[in-house]
């Protein structure tokens, strides 16, 4: 059980609540489809190099900062169980987080478009970092959730993510503690000023789901029940954020 399992389960739960859900796999490992229960995930968007170059590229090596992206979900995504729509971002092979190229401009424009849509929920499963994001995207993000494992390495990662998030304007963060918890972990998260939404204990049903190629929400178990409670906490927190704004 990790952030991808949580992301996929949360997406399915929100869809069952009536939300129009888009789940985006922005992790290089690209495992979100299995957590959603999607057998045939879409190709990564970065595979469509000609389309990206056509929309984001330009003459003389200049690229467009605002390429057309409003049809991407319908044309390049898939619809999975409970009506959850899914996209796979893919990775940019040349350049790092600061890559200024058509692919980078295209993906950022896509994120900016989808997170600003009304009456919907966008679940973005990212790597342990926020390299896909920038200030143009973050205006539409309600809440960033950090999945924290017991141990100092994970707490240090949470601290780094908080600093990076603050630097690009993400104001609201929360944590989910995975594989049990301890006063040590909760104390450090408290010192970082990151509220904890809940804890997910180790559950053999998650192992069974993985071995049988099933989505955790379709198997159930104590971990899924914990995630349901966390989902309700997320909705309450987002509601409070909206009222404050």
Image (cartoon, rainbow, N blue to C red):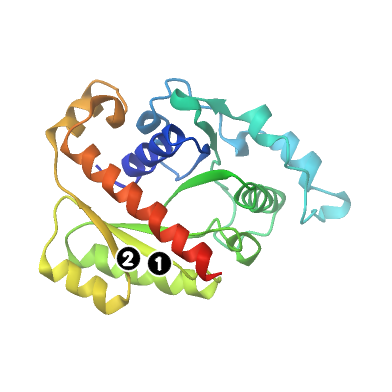
**Which quadrant of the figure has residue 138?**
bottom right
In the rendered view, tell whether residue 190 sits above or below residue 42. below
Q: Which mark is residue 157?
A: 2
Residue furthest to the bottom in view is 191
From the top left corner, tell me how far across and down residue 109 is, in percent: 69, 51
Where is the N terminus found, in terms of image quarters?
Answer: top left
Q: Position of residue 241 (x, y in %)?
A: 48, 65
On the question of residue 129 being in view, the answer is no
In the depicted view, which residue is nearer to us: 109 or 11?
A: 11
- 222 or 19: nearer the viewer: 19
Q: Which residue is mark 1?
A: 161
Task: Decide if residue 210 is on the left or right side of residue 160.
Answer: left
Label 2 CA crowd tier, 10 Å (few <14, some 14–19, many 20+): some
Residue nearer the viewer, 55 or 170: 170
Q: Nearer the viewer, residue 28 or 61?
A: 28
Local SS, label 1: helix
Percent position of residue 157, x then y: 32, 65
Q: Are marks 1 and 2 in contact (CB under 8 Å)?
A: yes
């Amino acid at each position: 059980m990790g952030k991808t399992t949580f992301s996929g389960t949360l997406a399915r739960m929100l869809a069952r609540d009536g939300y129009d859900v888009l789940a985006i796999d922005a992790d290089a490992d690209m495992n979100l489809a299995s957590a959603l229960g999607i057998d045939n995930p879409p190709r990564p968007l970065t595979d469509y190099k000609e389309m990206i170059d056509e929309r984001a590229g330009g003459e003389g090596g200049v690229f467009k900062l605002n390429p057309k992206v409003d049809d991407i979900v319908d044309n390049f995504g898939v619809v999975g169980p409970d009506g959850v729509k899914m996209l796979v971002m893919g990775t940019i092979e040349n350049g790092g987080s600061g890559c200024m190229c058509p692919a980078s401009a295209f993906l950022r424009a896509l994120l900016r478009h989808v997170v600003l849509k009304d009456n919907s929920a966008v679940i973005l499963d990212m790597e342990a970092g926020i390299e896909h994001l920038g200030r143009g995207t973050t205006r539409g993000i309600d809440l960033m959730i950090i999945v924290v494992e017991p141990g100092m390495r994970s707490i240090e990662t949470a601290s780094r993510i908080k600093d990076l998030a603050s630097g690009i304007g993400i104001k609201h963060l929360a944590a989910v503690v995975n594989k049990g918890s301890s006063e040590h972990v909760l104390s450090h998260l408290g010192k970082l000023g990151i509220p904890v939404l809940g804890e997910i204990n180790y559950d053999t049903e998650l192992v069974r789901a993985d071995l049988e190629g099933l989505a955790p929400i379709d198997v159930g178990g104590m971990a899924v029940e914990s995630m349901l409670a966390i989902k309700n906490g997320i909705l309450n927190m987002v509601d409070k954020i909206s009222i404050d704004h």
